[in-house]
């Protein structure tokens, strides 16, 4: 009888431990993912490395989010310009605009591959963020030969982000949802001031490679030290995450800015201009090629919808002027 009671007690104990473990996995997604195996991200076409890429936004003057879509003809013109120098682009959101871009690439057999973005926003509803996740999964499955990586969120953890997300465990659940649904490597893009923090390891443990953002200009550096600083940030983040490949997913130099207006931008010491951008781009491009660092330079075209419209010279704000091409698609000095 005592033996039977012991057996029953042991069975109950095993059951309770199993239930407790299952509950922990449901409520704490930061537990170690023992089955995780990294997917390699080394983009190529016909065996040729294409890792030196660029960010692409399709909106032209007078266009922008909520103002309608860019025509497929304009997208084709843009991609034909891009393809003269780059074969890898970064898209930021999973929406109709991105679908149109992917369709143009497929329909015209363009030699371009894509890192597909998912735009997550702390100001958006769960349904809106979920729609981005689901659309990205759908696109990754529909265009498996074009989409070579999926990026879950852009600058959603760094403390200064306007669209910051506070629930890291929820984002981890979203990363796992995407990664379980697609064959491509999955990443998260954020500023170096997130990736250099201890809490970044929770996210790094869930992704295949790290997407790093670092701007010498925004960090109050002058042009003469910009490339050394850019290199030092890359090496610092690599040392903190030695098991990961680090991709530079945003960096660049603007061709216009505002000065001395009392804003953060107005107090920066870096000079903006086409000459300055050309110097930085030439140094950075050589560094990327020499070190085979996967990169998405920011950005291909100026986008006038970006940035505020306040102040004495609103159209001079740097946010509108990161492109290597002007918004009319004419090349700046860096490409002439």
Image (tube, rainbow, N blue to C red):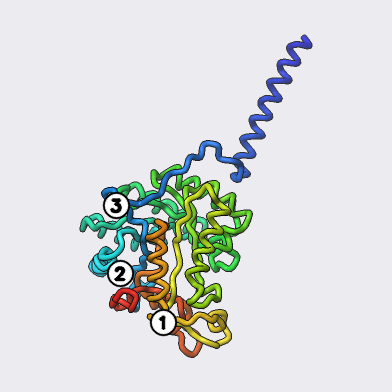
Image height of 325 relative to 35, above or below: below
Kindly identify the residue that appears in the image at 71 percent across and 20 percent down: 10
In the image, taking residue 146 as reference, residue 38 lies left or right, namely right
Kindly identify the residue that appears in the image at 45 percent across and 81 percent down: 272
Label at residue 273: 1
Q: Position of residue 171 (x, y in %)?
A: 54, 52
Residue annotated with mark 3: 48
In the image, taking residue 103 as reference, residue 294 lies left or right, namely right
Tell me the mark number nearer the camera, choosing from 1 and 2. 1
Residue annotated with mark 2: 70
SS class, disc 1: loop
Q: Position of residue 86 (x, y in %)?
A: 31, 62
**Mark 3, residues whose alpha carbon is within 10 Å: few (<14), some, or many (≥20)?**
few
Tell me which label, 2 or 3, sits earlier in the chain. 3
**Mark 2, residues whose alpha carbon is within 10 Å: few (<14), some, or many (≥20)?**
some
Tell me which label, 1 or 3, sits earlier in the chain. 3
Tell me which label, 1 or 2, sits earlier in the chain. 2
């Amino acid at each position: 009888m005592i033996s039977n009671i012991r057996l029953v007690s042991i069975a109950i104990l095993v059951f309770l431990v199993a239930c407790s473990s299952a509950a922990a996995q449901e409520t704490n997604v930061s537990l170690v993912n023992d089955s995780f195996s990294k997917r390699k991200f080394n983009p190529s076409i016909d065996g040729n490395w294409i890792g030196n890429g660029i960010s692409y936004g399709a909106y032209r003057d007078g266009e922008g989010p909520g103002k309608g879509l860019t025509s497929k003809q304009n997208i084709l013109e843009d991609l034909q310009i891009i393809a003269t120098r780059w074969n890898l682009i970064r898209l930021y959101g999973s929406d109709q605009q991105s679908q149109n871009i992917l369709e143009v690439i497929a329909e015209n057999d363009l030699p371009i591959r894509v890192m597909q973005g998912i735009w997550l926003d702390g100001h958006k509803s769960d349904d809106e963020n979920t729609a981005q996740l689901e659309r990205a999964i759908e696109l990754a499955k529909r265009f498996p030969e074009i989409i070579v990586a999926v990026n879950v969120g852009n600058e959603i953890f760094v403390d200064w982000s306007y669209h910051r997300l506070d629930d890291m465990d929820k984002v981890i659940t979203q990363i796992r949802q995407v990664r379980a649904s697609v064959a491509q490597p999955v990443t998260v893009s954020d500023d170096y001031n997130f990736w250099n923090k201890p809490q970044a390891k929770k996210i790094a443990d869930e992704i295949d490679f790290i997407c790093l953002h670092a701007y010498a200009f925004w960090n109050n550096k002058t042009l003469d030290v910009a490339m050394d600083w850019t290199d030092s940030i890359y090496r610092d983040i690599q040392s903190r995450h030695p098991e990961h490949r680090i991709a530079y997913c945003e960096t660049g130099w603007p061709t216009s800015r505002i000065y001395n207006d009392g804003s953060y931008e107005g107090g920066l010491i870096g000079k903006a201009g086409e000459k300055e951008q050309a110097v930085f781009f030439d140094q950075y491009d050589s560094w990327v090629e020499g070190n085979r660092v996967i990169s998405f330079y920011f950005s291909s075209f100026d986008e006038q919808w970006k940035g505020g419209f306040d102040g004495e010279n609103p159209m001079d704000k740097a946010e509108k002027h990161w492109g290597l091409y002007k918004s009319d698609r004419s090349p700046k000095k860096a490409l002439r």
